[in-house]
Image (tube, rainbow, N blue to C red):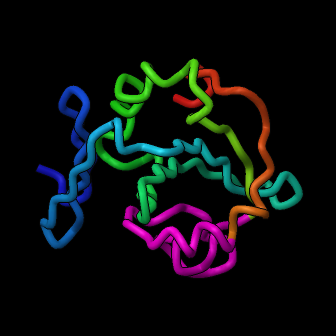
Amino acid sequence: MPKNEILIDKNKISMRLDNDTLYSMNINQLEKFYCLYIGSEVLANDSTCYLLIFNDKLWLIPDSTYGAHNLRTWIEPLIESDKIIIGQIDHLPFKWRAKRFFFGLEAQLAIKDLKQFNEMEPRISILHDANLDEIF
């Protein structure tokens, strides 16, 4: 069993972190779902992560996380809502990265305080309406 993973069970999502802590939320608690493209065409570096925004927490999920591909099934019922957003940002805050150096853009699986997201949200460019085939 992988240490870092996403588990989907009907309407419930769980995140298991390295320290074997398991966090769970229900889909009806989800306020926003971001598919976030990270990188710059100038530097030719890119990465994708998912941001799940709940009441006061943000789940940061790199697309390479074991089980992240199952998010498609979990959010499919929300596709007609305004809860799914596709966006782009040049880089994540250093504290959000798996490797904390300039070219390390891959997100680190984590739960963050929503205040941190509110500070970076103005830097996100919204691309277009959600299309599951583009997200996953």
Q: Residue at x 21, y 58 (%)?
A: 23
- Residue at the extreme right: 42
Q: Position of residue 89 (x, y in %)?
A: 74, 57
Residue 45 in which image quadrant: bottom right
4 up-or-down from 12: above or below: below
Residue 130 in which image quadrant: top right
Nearest to the observer: residue 68 or residue 75:
75
Give the tally of numbered discs.
0
Residue 133 in which image quadrant: top right
Left or right position of 120 against 136: right
68 up-or-down from 70: above or below: below
Nearest to the observer: residue 21 or residue 33:
33
Q: Residue at x 56, y 35 (%)?
A: 83
Q: Residue at x 30, y 45 (%)?
A: 66
Q: Position of residue 106 (x, y in %)?
A: 54, 61
Residue 94 sits inside the magenta stretch: yes
Q: Position of residue 43 (x, y in %)?
A: 82, 61
Q: Residue at x 63, y 68 (%)?
A: 118
Left or right position of 15 against 105: left
Left or right position of 78 against 44: left
Residue 47 sits inside the magenta stretch: no
Report the span colored magenta: 91-119
Q: Position of residue 122 (x, y in %)?
A: 77, 63
3 up-or-down from 35: above or below: below
